[in-house]
Amino acid sequence: MNSLEQYKDSSHYRKIYEQIETLGLVEHINHLDEYGYAVIPSELVAPEEFQDRLRQAVLDVNERRTGQKIDLKDIETAKLSRDAPGEGHWGLLTEDPVFQEMLMNPTVLAMGKYQCGNSALLSDMLCILKHKDERFTHPLHTDQHGTPPPLPPYAQVSNVTWTLTDYKVGNGPVAIVPKSHLKGRYPLPEEGNFLREDAPVKPIPIEAAAGSLIVWDGRTWHGSYPRENEGLRMNVILVFTRVYMKQIRDFRSTVPQEILDQHPVEFAHLIGANSMYPFRDGKPPATKEENAYMMAAGYNPWA
Ligand SMILES: O=C(O)CCC(=O)C(=O)O
Ligand SMILES: [Fe+2]
């Protein structure tokens, strides 16, 4: 028996699994377990109108941060003004309410929690805009930096990539090595450059229509192909992590109370606003209830 199976007979697992069933995601978690990634079609994610709001919000962030205005109608021909293969913008959560809605999207949360438990944290949220450029951006790596081998039999990080344009060969898609989550280690530097003729490890391009989620395990080896076609590839990436891990972004000291007030308490849990560590004022929390959701994580991978 797989060492994780024994923990499925629990309220923590059932809570997540019921949501997975309700949302029609069972075949996708099965694919994720077997291959280390899954592609979830846009019908199971969000309506077209929401997808357009997201695309516009990404273009607005890019304009605020780079000064380059790109019209939504031009994304199939646009070129970034920067002399690099792409632009990445971290820290999107407070840039636009649409990113907060995206975090609370049931399909996104179900996949993040399936991999990192009910106590999962948002580590950060970023967008990448990529244009035609021959240069290599991402050699093979995992997103679970600093987690030593042998890796545990569950994800410590989950990448939920929301595609905003079509991912296909030529469009600079993500490159994934199927089943590499089972290797239990990070790729070695000499295994990274998968574009070399004699590359020791060859990934496959992951095709997904705009609006899909591409979800992968923090242990999965992946990279990215250069974009050969005109126009932009755009995405928003939500990185989830386990409650005991350090988040990429310090949301606790930076998200204003007025934003927390607009969301259910789950939002505060997700960004770690009420995490036990680091201690507030150097002291443990006053009541056990405050951290019960985090303490539960020590007993079950889905807690
Ligand atoms: O842009 C890509 O295709 C891959 C980016 C990546 O490595 C990641 O999101 O973790
Ligand atoms: Fe990555």
Image (tube, grey):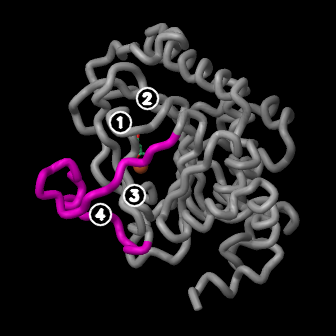
User: Which of label 1 and label 3 is nearer to you?
Assistant: 1
Is the distance from the Cβ of mark 2 to the nearest ligand 1 atom less than 8 Å?
yes
Where is residue 85? Give x, y as percent. 30, 28
Q: Is mark 3 within 8 Å of ligand 2?
A: yes
Q: Earlier in the sequence, mark 1 or mark 2?
A: 1
Which residue is identified by label 4?
Answer: 187
Q: Amino acid at mark 3?
A: Thr
In the rendered structure, the answer to whether residue 50 lies left or right of residue 60 reads: right
- Determine the secondary structure under disc 3: loop
Identified at 74% across, 35% down, the residue is: 101
Whether tag 1 and tag 4 are in contact, CB under 8 A, the answer is no
Residue at the far left in the pictured view: 198
Which residues fall within the magenta stretch? 182-208
| Residue at 83% across, 75% down | 11
Residue 194 forms part of the magenta stretch: yes
Distance between mark 3 and mark 4 Cα atoms: 8 Å
In terms of image quadrants, where is residue 117? bottom right
Residue on which the image places disc 3: 142
Residue type at mark 1 is Gly
Task: Mark 3 and mark 4 in contact? Answer it, CB < 8 Å.
Answer: yes
Mark drawn on residue 233: 2
